[in-house]
Amino acid sequence: MRWTAPALRNLLARLDETYPDARCALEHEDPYQLVVATILSAQCTDARVNLVTPALFKKYPNPAKLARAKTDELEALIHSTGFFRNKAKNLIGLGQALEERHGGKVPSDREALAALPGVGPKTANVVLANAFGIPALAVDTHIYRVARRLNLSTANTPEKVGIDLCQRFPEDYWIPLHHQLIWHGRQVCDARKPKCEVCPLRDLCPTGSGKIEDPHRSGA
């Protein structure tokens, strides 16, 4: 289907109705906790990260403590999140960089955030949106899949899909849209077995209505 302005408004309205409480699944109390949790979430579920972070933040409650962490002790705490050696290296580097460059505080500047160890553009967008309320739209595996199935983008990288989404929707919608598309991907638009029969977006979705082949399954 061709995404006209009325169709896009209809899509947003349905997402609002279906996922009114959509929010960041990573439990955090401040920007520092969020950036740490987001780094840990790479190749790991948010639920697993949430099991690990209470003990982690108790031992390393601020960047100064994290900067001085002993590698083996930190690795033991985050082992279950996977890729723990690289993550531990990045977290210690993060603490050091925050202390040395930013006075122990997480910056709200996009470029400064993305330059921190283990962060990059995607994590920076997550922190900007959820810790500072600055419009940003990070594209994870769920958003990438849902956006392509809805034909909101035909791009083949998360970065390009993000650009397409930001061009289609006003800045005011970026933060809630990010969470709603993730929830939709988790609850309905599953990677292997999408629940098209109960999908509230089916008549708007060219994939679910059979108008186009599933771009996710084809690997396109």
Image: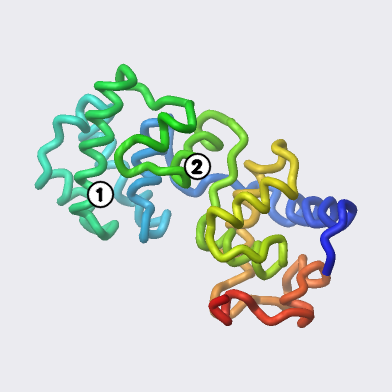
Type of amino acid under label 1: Lys
Q: Quadrant of residue 206?
A: bottom right
Mark 2: few/some/many CA within 10 Å (<14, 14-19, 20+): many
In which quarter of the view is residue 120 placed? top left
- On residue 87, which mark appears? 1
Q: Residue at x 25, y 43 (%)?
A: 90
Residue at the location (84% across, 65% down)?
2
- What percent of the width, then of the height, locates residue 7? 86, 58
Secondary element type, mark 2: helix
Q: Residue furthest top?
A: 103
Q: Is residue 138 above or below residue 153?
A: above
Q: Quadrant of residue 205?
A: bottom right
- Is 83 on the left or on the right of 108, as rendered? left
Q: Quadrant of the C terminus?
A: bottom right
Q: Residue at the spot x=58%, y=55% of the render? A: 160
Mark identifier at residue 126 = 2
